[in-house]
Structures are given as structure tokens and as C-alpha cells.
Amino acid sequence: MANLNITNILEKMTGKDKDYRYMATSDLLSELNKESFKADQDLEPKLTITVLQQLEDASGDVSGLAVKCLAPLVKKVGEDRVVEMTNKLCDKLINGKDQHRDTASIALKTIIAEVTTPSLAEKILLSLAPQLIKGVNTAKSAEIKCECLDILADVLHRFGNLITKDHEYMLNALLSQLGSNPASVRKKSISCIASLAPSLSDDLLAKATLQVVQLLKNRGAKSEITRTNIQMIGSLSYCTSASENDEELREYSLQALESFMLRCPRDISPYCEGILNLALEYVSYDPNFTDSMDEDTDEEAKEEDDDDESANEYTDDEDASWKVRRASAKCLSAIIVSRPEMLSKMFLEACPKLIERFREREENVKMDIFNTFIELLRQTGNVTKGQGDIDESSPRWLLKQEVPKVVKSINRQLREKSIKTKVGAFSVLKELVVVLPDCLADHFGSLVPGIEKALNDKSSTSNLKIEALVLTRLVMASHSPSVFHPYIKALSAPILSAIRDRYYKVTAEALRVCGELVRVLRPNLETTSVDFKPYIGPIYNAILGRLANQDQDQEVKECAISCMSLVVSTFGDGLERELPACLPILVDRMGNEITRLTAVKAFSVIANSPLRIDLSCVLDHVVSELTAFLRKANRALRQATLGTLNSLVVTYGGQIGSSSYETIIAELSTLISDMDLHMTALALELCCTIMVDRKSIQNVGLAVRDKVLPQALVLIRSALLQGQALQALQRFFASLVQSANTSFDALLESLISAAKPSHSAGDQKCASTIEMLKGILKDDSTTNSAKQHMALLCLGEIGRRKDLSNHVQIENIVIESFQSPFEEIKSAASYALGNIAVGNLSKYLPFILDQIDNQQKKQYLLLHSLKEVIVRQSVDHTGQSELQDSNIEKILALLFNHCESEEEGVRNVVAECLGKISLIEPKKLVPALEVRTSSPAANTRATVAIAIKYSIVERPEKIDEIMYSKISTFLMLIKDSDRHVRRAAVLALSTAAHNKPNLIKGLLPEILPLLYDQTVIKQELIRTVDLGPFKHVVDDGLELRKAAFECVDTLLDSCLDQVNPSSFIVPFLLSGLGDHYDVKMPCHLILSKLADKCPSAVLAVLDSIVEPIEKTISHKPKGDAVKQEVDRNEDMIRSALRAISSLSRISGSDYSIRFKNLMNKITATPALAEKYNSVRGE
């Protein structure tokens, strides 16, 4: 029936009336778009012939519809029919009439875009490519050649890798066109070769490059041919010798250099300096225009009439020098993006030049200069994240010095008439504030007129207003309120006027700025340096207008709610009359699912206000709504609700009824579990608040004891319990006893029955508790090891806080546990002994030292006890003098004696002890450690390096100034002949990079090549162990390689400005991606980080990276593999997919054929696709 209908439509399509033909073609399009449509064998040829005929229809509307029919038709007919259609269209393109050529070209492009199956793509390529190449070589008209090249570029871009055998033939044909006369043919040939390049073999690519370089060497060639060749070199990846007027040659040369910087960063390294100098020279290249340098020294208070200066500027339609300046700016941008290690140099050489060029007369070039400067700022933020600007060679410090010049130059741009220029200027300032948050404190006044004008001027576009508002918000949020007090009058009116703007994005941004303005007006409730009262009414009314209006965008609704909460919490004491009208609106917004979360957070802000806003009119309603939200599935809503309830209980606890508390506590008990520790911590915090605030209400205490305590006792057994949740649980138990709802004895009994508690005791109970714990230890340890374990941990915690010397022989009771058959009890005993010693050093430290000397078998555990003492003392500055007075010489002699121990565990404990003592006595320890770096015993050298690792902590210490001059001696152990020593040095370097990057920055140029060398697989460290029936390969270098890659990962976070990523990716990272499981995991992390921070360096070698990653995700464990191996392989695949996800976000990654194929493979394999989607959603 459907086919009969189609036959009727086809008949009407060939009628004489064009309207009939149009309607019939439209009907056909509708039929083809139906999923149920299927053409039979007889209908297919009729269908394709009629649609092709319609393409030549005299009516443009009909032929346009026919082109639209092609897209669904390709999917509904057989492959042979599609090939037949492309052949006919190709023939029309090359040999047909001129008027039909455009339609044939569009039709071919449409068909090619719809081809998805490799089999059809191959058939089309085999039939189409030779015809198109023939058209390129033999067509008389340049237009036909261009159309052929256009379509060929499309085909090669999508399917170039499918017909490798024809690559050479195609490449030769295309290279021959580079000498063609019409410029359009040359340009199209270049893009065609660029589309083919990614799928060419290395030999052919080398041949193409060589041929173009040979052509460049031909000094007698016409300048336009030279331009083409330079463009060609740029696509595959001599400026000053260009003739005076040949701007295009300069432009193409700079574009080629830009392309090299981005795509061949390793090979271009030696020429970076020269390229930078060229780009800096030509960024101000303007031979036809002389600009007086005095303009920059003009007074800031420039007359408004000067706005006309941009209108009267010199213009010359034939002047093409702007293209050179634009290409130079982009080339500088490429250097900034791809060379983080040159950043300080860029500030010294390029930054002043870019600031000077802000006054560029050609607007498009000016935008590129702004963008280049923004890239410089972004890279600064990227490279110096988490670093200070103390160092005078630091990019942040250098940028700070340039701020006055930047502001002065940008101010001139804000006085220009062009909207585009003003938007660009605000973008620069915005990025500047993001990178240097407090940099405009001295300059904000000079920017106010520009911001005011952008918001008030009738000619301002929405985009300009948004940029001005975003900048104002960022500056207000990052600077001291006093900076703005002189300008509040000038700024408040335009901001409030923007709240009433028609465009919702302007309104939303203005409301956000208004929120910051409220904070600025009254930063401190006690003292005020500005009279804020005249502003309260206008601000409140402007926001209320938006808050009360239901019919508006969600973003505006949310911003109005947040802003109103800030107004109420800051100015509530001046809004008593208005609150009964405003608060019910906020409550109403809690009932709406879309604005619910924002309204909950708004009440938290109001409840936290020191003004204790009167909420009596809505409090009960708010509490009952919030209690109901604790049952909702939305996690973010539950989190916000717990926080808001906590604030409400603290401020308005007395006004909330006991029945409400009981309901809240019942809901909280369901949230306490180890499935979501963050939510558990918040729920326990709220429980503590309720217990402390509501001691007098008996029902509350009972509800907590009956509902929450059982959940807490289940939670305490969880192995996952840590951090915030553990601290909250400890506070919960303390509150439970303090609120007198549960006796200490009852709680202690519950905790002991839980077997693995954390525990704290009050003064009165301390002695009896310790006696009880000693009793547990004296029992037979084999009967109840869990109780023994708990008792030892408790003794350690109590001993650290209280002197236990009154309890006779307690140290000997603990030492007896060293004999236990259970490892965890031995470990707990050494922990307990060390912490008991912390409580009374003068008594217990000599005892531990004496035992170490006399008890050879217990040495390892006793050293752990000593480590506990030293670590606690190194952190607690008040106790350091106590340890110094003790026999520190004896401790050192003892530790140095054990440096050469054969047991790695002993050496590690000794190293940690030495490292922590060096924090207490650096002047004594650092020279002693330095001497031992040249010890003949490798174990001693390794212990010294690990000791240095433990001495580098995040907080400032007196060892730091000594370390600056000495650290190179220790880190140079990375050259040691022993692999254990090298690994220890790598670990020390990694810790230094993480905790104190400034210590090592100056050494990195020397250390990095040595570090990279540790990532290479060394055959001499691989040995085969003969185990009789089978042989086992042991790789002794594995741990060293893993540590080296993890160290590079840390360096990318803290010292990116010292690392040249290109020289690391190939060959070192590439080798790591194909290494052992333990090495691949950190390499995937590094790759993700580089894709985010240095995308250009990764993009340049993306094709090489694909192969090892593809092998990883395709790897399948052997059939007899144990569960652990299967799980490890799954983890490795997920890790690789995370790296692939980061690579896919790089702009331009889709140009790599190999990467595209990899992505297609992932989406076509259901198991991989599922994992990939889950990884992306993390």
C-alpha cells in the first residue's frame, strides 16, 4: 500500500505544474522520513532516478526539496543504488551544465555526510575518488576544479584511511595543483592534502613535506606560489626575506610557524626563541601608519570628545598589514599555550608589547591581541595554581608589576565607541581578576566611569552589560569592601536599573552583583564606615519586584531568592515592616520543586545572620517543610536541609516545639550509615546541636538514645569510618554524655560491646577506665583479640593526653602484648607504648631506648614506639624543648646504627624518625644526613633520602632555610647506581614538589632529564626466576618507574612552568602507557592532566598515543585468571577510558583519524560504551 502511494507521488513529481511538483516532492520527503518506510526492488530505481531528475528542476524550490530528500533516501535504498547516484552526480558536476553544477555539488556533499557504514564508504571512495582526481587534473574551468577538490576534501576527511593503496596516486595529483594559477585552486588543494595527511603513511607524509620544502628553496618562484607552499607546510604540520609589499607571504609564514608550534612542539623547540622574536616584531608591523607614542602618556581625564578618535582613524582598503599583525598575535598565542616553561620569559618580553598593542586600530586584530593576552593570563593561572608570588621570577609576581599599565591601557579602550572593543576589554579585566584576585584595589576608581557608561548607555548591548556586571561582581567578591565605598553611589543606580532589564541574563547577573553590593555596604554589623540606610529601600524594592513575579526565567528566580536572603540577613533590622510580606514568598518558593533547593539555602543564610531576624511568622512552616525534605531522594536537597536545620536550631531553638524535634530526630536516624559518610557527618552534627541546645527537653534525649544511638553503634564498626564522619561521631558520643541523657558507664559498655570503638574518658572516670583496660590486657590474649586490640588503642589515646606514671608497671603490661601471635595487636601495642611515653617523656623515653638496645627481637616494634614519640613532638611545638633536653644524642646514635639494617621496614621507621627529628634539630641533623649521602652502604644512602622526604612538610619550619642550599645534594642521589637509592630520591623529590615546590624549582632543569630516565624500562633490571615447572619474570625496576611517573604527576600540579610537556610525552609517557598495570595507572592520570593543562602538546602526538591506549582497553585476561586479575584489568580499562574522555574534550581531537576510529570502536562495543558513559558521568 505504501509503495502504491509512493508511485502516485512519483508520477505527480514529473507533472508540468511546478506547484504540484513542489507538493509531491514535499510528500515524498515526509514518506522517506517515516521509520516504517521501505522501498522494494522495483521501486528503488524509479525513486532514485526521479529524485535525481528533480535536482535539475527549473524551480529552485523544488530542487532544494529534492536535495533534502537525499539524506533519508541514502539510508532507505541499497548500497549499489547510492553508488550509482554518486556516479551520476559526479558526472553532472564535471561534465554537466553550469547551472546544475552547484546543485550536484550540494547533493554529493549531502550524500557523503549521511554515509556511516564502512562498506558503503569504501564503495563510494573506489568509484568517486578517481573521477574527482580526473576532474581536478583535466577540468578546464577553475570552478569545476574547486568543486571537485571541495568534495574530495570531505570524502578524505571522513574516510581517507579506507583506501590506503590509492594514497600515493592522490597525493601526487594534489601536489601538482600547488603550482596551479588560480589561487582558489591552490587553497582548496591545500585543504584537501590536509584532510588526507592524517591517514597517510609516514613515508608518504615525509615525501609530501620534502617536495614542498624543495619548492620553497626555489628562489625564482613567484611569490604567490611561495605563499601557497608555506601554507601547505602549515597544513601538514622565511618571514623577513619577503618583499616589502608581500603581506600575504608574511601572514602565511607566521601561520605556518603557529601550526608548527601547536602540532610539532618537540621538533620546533630549538627555534622557539627565533619565532618569539619574529612574532613580537610583526605584531606591531604597520608600515602605512605612524602612531605617536605620546598617546600613551595622555591624562586619564580625557575629554569625551576624544571618542571620535576611533572614527577619524586612518583607513586604507588596500592595506593588508593587519593580516600580518593578526597572524603574529595568533603565533604568540600558540607559544603561550604550548610552552608553559617559557611563561616568565613571555612576561618579560611579550607582555609589555601586547599591552602596548591594545591600541591596535583594526578591530579584528585588536580582538586577537585581547585573546592572546587572555591566554597569557589563563596560562599564568594554570601554571601557578596553588603557588605564592614571593619569588621575583614567578609569573604571578611579574604579572602584578604590569597591572597599572594594563589598567591604564584598558581604560582607553573602554572610552572607545565600538561595543566589540569594550566587551574585549572587560574580558581581559575579568581574566586578570580571576588570576590575581586583589590586583585592582588601587585602580578600581579609574574603571568606574567605564563600567557606569557600559550599564547606562542606551547603545550598550546585552553582552556588554553582562561583561561589565560580571567584572563588577568578581572585583567585589575578591577585594576589600573599603575599596568600593567611595563609588557605591555611582554604581548602585546602574546595577539596580539592570535588575529591571528585559533580557533575563542581564537581570540574573545584576542580581548576583546586588548580592555582593549588599555585603560591601555592610561588611561588619558592629561598625559601619558608610551610611547604608538610604540604599536599603531601593535595593529591597528592586529585588522584591523580581522575587514576587512568577512568570520569569528560572535563573532569575534563583538569583532573586539568593539575593533577597542576603538583604534580609544583612539589613533585617531596618526591614521589620517588610518582612511579613517578604518571608512568606520565600516559604512559597520552598514548595516549588524548581526553586526548592535555592530557598532552603536562603533560609540558612537568614538563620546564620547575627541580627537574629524575627522568623516567628513562618518558622513552624519552614521547619515542617524541611523535615519532610529529609525523606526526598535528591541528595543535594537533603544536604542543604541538614545545614539549614542546624542553623535554625542554633538561632531559634527555643521557638521550635519538642514534637518537631522528635520528628527531626526520627528522620535523622535513617540518614546515619556508612553508605554516605558526608550525609552521616551532617546528620550527627545536627543531633549534637539539638542535644546541646535542648538539654532541658527530656523527650529529645530519649529520642536520640532510642533512635540515633543504635545507628551510631552500627556505624562505629564500619571499616570505612574516617575524617569528618569519625570526628562528628566522637562529638556525638561526648554530647550524649554531657547532655545527661545517657550515663558514661552505659555508653562505655555499649562501645566495648562494639569491640572496635574510638573512645574518650572524663577526668573522674580515667583511673577506673585504665584499670579496667589493664584487666582486659592481663586476660588470655587468645580468647578475645578484638578487646585486647581496643584496650591498647584506648590506652595510647589516653596516655597521649594524660600522664599515666601513677599506674605502676603499665609499660611492662603493654610490652607483654609484643609477644601476641596477632600482628594487629603487636602494632597497637607499639602505638600504645609510644603514646604513653608522650604523656611523660622523662620517665618512659629512657625505658624505650633501653629496650631497643637490649631487646633485639622486639626492635622493629620498639622503633615504631619511638617513631610515635618523635612524630608527636615534631608536630607539637611546645613539646620540642622537652625532647631536646632528653637524650637526643643517644636517639641519633641508635637510629644511625640501624640505617644499614637489611630489613626495609626497620629502615623506613628509622628514616621517618630521622626526618621528624630534623624538624626539631635541623642544624644538627641536616649536616649529619648530608655526610651519609656518600656512605659506601647503599641502604644508608636510601635511608637518608627517605629521611629527607619525611622532613619536608607542608607547614613552614625552621629547617626550610637550611634545606634551600642543601637539598640538591640529597636529590642528586637520583643518579645513584643502586635502584633503591634512586627510588628513595624520586620519592623525596615528589614530596618536595607537593609540599614545598619552591625548594626544588631552581634544580628542575638539571633533575628532570634524570627523572625521565627513571621511567624507562631497563632490561638489566629484568630477570627470569626458574621455578622448575615454569619460569617467572621479575621486573626489579617496576617500583622505580611507578614512583617516577607519580613524581611527574605531582610536578605537573606544582611546577608546570618548569616542565616542557612535549619532551616528556614522547618517548617517556608513550612508553609508560604500554608498560605494566602499576605504571599505566599513573600514566593515564598524567595524560588526563596534560589534556586539560597542555592540550596543544597532547594534540600534536595524539595519533601515537591512541595505539597503547587502544591495546589497554582491548586487553582481556586469560581464561584461568583469578578474580583479582580480572578486577585489576577492569580498573585499568576504566582508568584508560577516563584518559580517553579527557582527550575527547580537547578542541581538534576529532581531526585525528586514529582517535576518531578509537571513539567509534568504543561506541560500537556495548561493554566499552557502557563503561565509557559511566566514567564520563563520574
Image (tube, rainbow, N blue to C red):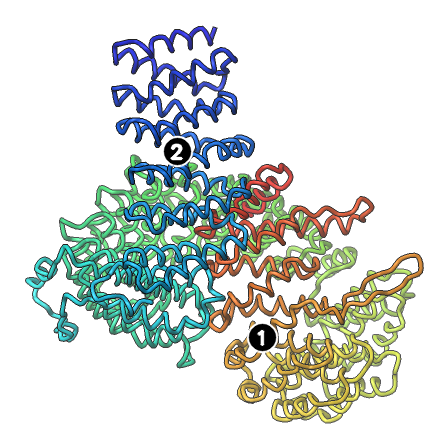
Query: Vertical placement of 765 versus 849: above or below?
Result: above
Q: Is residue 743 left or right of residue 568?
A: right
Say what amino acid the circle numbered 1 marks. Answer: Pro
Query: Vertical placement of 488 versus 1166: above or below?
Result: below
Nearer mark to the viewer, of 2 and 1: 2
Query: Vertical placement of 300 versus 862: above or below?
Result: above
- Decide which of 433, 890 is in the foreground and name it: 433
Q: Which structural element holds mark 2?
A: helix
Whether residue 474 appears in this view of the structure is: no
Residue 1029's quadrant in the figure? bottom right
Q: How many marks?
A: 2
Q: Residues within 10 Å of mark 1 (few under 14, many from 20)?
A: few
Residue 702: x and y in percent read 64, 49
Residue at horizontal 63 percent and vertical 77 percent from the top: 988
Q: Is residue 660 left or right of residue 85?
A: right
Q: Is residue 622 left or right of residue 1176?
A: left
Q: Which residue is mark 1?
A: 1009
Residue at horizontal 36 percent and vertical 69 percent from the top: 436
Q: CA distance from mark 2 to mark 1?
A: 50 Å
What label does residue 221 carry, if any? Answer: none
The earlier-in-sequence mark between 2 and 1 is 2
- Decide which of 1102, 1092 is in the foreground and name it: 1102
Q: Which residue is mark 2?
A: 109
Residue 175: x and y in percent read 41, 50
Whether residue 117 appears in this view of the structure is: yes
- Decide which of 1143, 220 is in the foreground and name it: 220
Residue 789's quadrant in the figure? bottom right
Residue 272: x and y in percent read 41, 71
Say what amino acid the circle numbered 2 marks. Answer: Lys
